[in-house]
Image (tube, grey):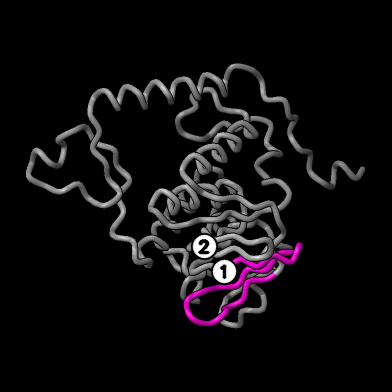
Amino acid sequence: MTTTETETTCDVCIVGAGPAGLTAGLFTARAGLETLIVNTGEPILRRNSHLENVPGFPAGVNSRLFLDMLVDQVERNGCGRLEAEVTEVTESGGERFAVATADERLIRSDYVICASWAESNYVAGIDEIGLMKRGSKTYIDVNEEGETGVDGLYAAGRLAGEPHQTVVAAGHGAKVALSVIHDSEVPFYNDWVAPEGYFTERGREVPPGCEEIDEEERQRREQQSMEVMQEYFDSSHPEMPTQHPSVREE
């Protein structure tokens, strides 16, 4: 990723840092694509008092803690993050998009994933994109792969019309990221860490995106994961849920 005071160049720019945007960034970054997540404010998920329906948490999990862990995970995997308001996405010729921000920064990216529920005004100037109005909400029209019909421009999560559930948004973010990976020059990507010899002792090459590790390394990673999770769950999260704006105004 190339960055100056006013301009950044990357492979993938993701607008929005909720479950869809963060999960998409995790997948593209792990695939080796230089990824930058841009967001302003806070995800709607921070309004949730206790997240009950995400697999892997038998008694639920604090939603703010869940988001903090997602942010940590994308950063550990090399995903860049920028706090800024995206004001416009335009096609800048060639294979790159120009993503402009309110603080006059320009991000040039081969691929853009829109995951910024419920804001889509920044793509309104692209004639080929389909925007769907449902009541007071505006969605981006996409196909099953999250493609908008504009090469290189995708939408994920609630903004793409997916159900308003954390696990669905995260899963859709992953699916759209895999579409980006498939459409890029990156070889087929299969995120799988296997025991030593799983492929090679069968006379097969380790597939792109896969990895074989020996028992010592497996134990090291397991121990690290346990220590990280214990640290996260050592005490209550310090932040209270964010109340709905209409309630705060009363």
Q: CA distance from mark 2 to mark 1?
A: 6 Å
Q: Are marks 2 and 1 in contact (CB under 8 Å)?
A: yes
Q: Position of residue 112 (x, y in %)?
A: 53, 65
Residue type at mark 1? Arg
Vertical position of residue 202 compared to residue 62: above or below: below
Q: Is residue 47 visible?
A: yes
Residue drawn at 50 percent across, 61 percent down: 12
- Asked whether 103 falls inside the magenta stretch, the response is yes
Residue type at mark 2? Cys
Residue drawn at 47 percent across, 64 percent down: 146
* Magenta stretch bounds: 88-108
Count of numbered labels shown in the rendering: 2
In the current view of this chain or complex, which residue is farthest to the front?
4
In the rendered structure, the answer to whether residue 54 lies left or right of residue 41 reads left
| Foreground of the two, 137 or 1 | 1
Q: Is residue 160 visible?
A: no
Task: Residue under label 2, please give it.
Answer: 10
Q: Say the numbered circle drawn on residue 108.
A: 1
In the rendered structure, the answer to whether residue 186 lies left or right of residue 73 reads left
Q: Quick one: SS at disc 1?
A: strand
Q: Position of residue 131 (x, y in %)?
A: 62, 72
